[in-house]
Image (cartoon, rainbow, N blue to C red):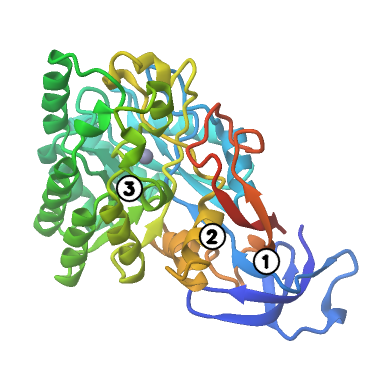
Amino acid sequence: MKNMFIKNGILINAEESRKADLLVHDGKIVETGTIAAGELPENGRVIDAEGCRILPGGIDPHVHLSLPTPAGNSSDDFLSGSRAALAGGTTTLFDFVTPRRGQSLHEALVERRLESERSRCPCHLHMGISEWNNEIAKEIVPLIESQGITSFKAYLAYQETIGITPSALKELMTIVAPTGATVMVHCEDGDMISKLCKILLSECKTRPFYHAIARMAETETGAISTVLELSVQTSCPVYIVHVSTGEGARLISAAKQSGIKVFAETCPHYLLLDDSRYGAEIPDREVLPCIMSPPLRTTEDQSALWKGLNDGTFDVVATDHCPFNTYGQKDIGLKDFTRIPNGVGGIEYRTRLLYTYGVLQGRISLEKMVYLTSSRPAEIFGLSHSKGRLAPGFDADIVLLNPDFEEIISTKNQVQKCDSNIYEGMTLRGRITIL
Ligand SMILES: [Zn+2]
């Protein structure tokens, strides 16, 4: 087990930063402060962290490794995806069980747990609900009580494959409410999107950028309103994944102020990229890598999301990491945008993107970055007893951020497995080492 003495670093926790040493015995933090070197066991490492920031390991509660789709699995599997996570300072992941329709939740959980064992870092699972009937309803409470499931995920989009209706979601939330578990929801109005897709295709508007036109901002904000209302009706805590619009953030902020128990997440791509990636003049193959749901929004939305990171609207920045290759996967939908597998990579860059474009540009503090990427997700998903803080008794998931380094993002130097990279050419400040 890990024994370490890290001296002279600056420890960053969500509530405060301070210059301090840190002592690790058997993989646990045992002391922080001014520590005498003699306290280190003989087989321990001494690390001089002068000039470096020391962060609690990142927790990404939203990734899709080896996600099965009609275009094949997402291109990072548990092994490569977890390596990319570790390269980026994330030491704990949450992926999803996505049961096939007709399959029991329990059976799907067993299968996915087996797959996730290939991860190089702890990988927990949220339980996806891809259809709704009496059998599924009966499985919910036993999964919480005997399998330790604390979070369920439902999609209001993708009605044809894994989505459920708002009335089914209400039944799920009614069952989950008294248990203390949380329901995560992908908020996009699936019916509205299906109708828009049919209209566009019937008008021969098939190019990739129409994906974003079919998923206009209202498809997200309408679904967020529906889910907030269901939370009021059922008293079930909800976690709204990947909020992409300023209006969505505003609705959530108002709901929080009125006492609704809602958690909100956004992603680095909504903070840093915008809908100029969907210009009609851009070659279709260059648009394909940026096809995700919800799509990229306007620069005004971006500003509102950054504001929401600071004013308490958002609890978490997660990546929704779900890359697909452009050649052989995304290009299946080159002539029909509805067939493009949705998703992008980002697990490797979350910490450094937030550091470079958030902290160094004065948009968020380093403490806020730790809150959004580690301590808050630990609290929401039941890990706050052991993860998300640099303090005695906590796991020694320790990230060293050395601000003196710079790197240009490129498919040539990435760890993630994918033939494209939506952040290609962007500069990252800081080098990450997992201790
Ligand atoms: Zn997702």
Q: Secondary structure at mark 3?
A: loop
Q: Quadrant of residue 372?
A: bottom left
Q: Which residue is mark 2?
A: 356
Instruction: Indicate whether 53 appears above or below 191.
Output: below
- Circles 1, 3 touching at the beta carbon (< 8 Å): no
- Please tell me which residue lies in front, 244 or 178: 244
Residue drawn at the location 41% of the way across and 51% of the way down: 272
Instruction: Note whether ligand 1 is within 8 Å of mark 3.
Output: yes
For label 2, count other residues whose C-alpha is less than 10 Å away and answer few (under 14), some (14-19) or many (20+).
some
Q: Quadrant of the C terminus?
A: bottom right
Q: Residue at x 59, y 59 (%)?
A: 57
Residue 45 in picture, x, y percent from top left? 84, 65
Residue 77, relative to residue 143: is it above or below?
above
Residue 392 visible at all: no
- Residue found at x 42% / y 34%: 109
Badge 2 vs badge 3, beta-carbon distance below 8 Å? no
x, y percent for residue 414: 63, 38
Label 2 to label 1: alpha-carbon separation:
29 Å
Q: Quadrant of ligand 1?
A: top left
Q: Which mark is residue 28?
A: 1
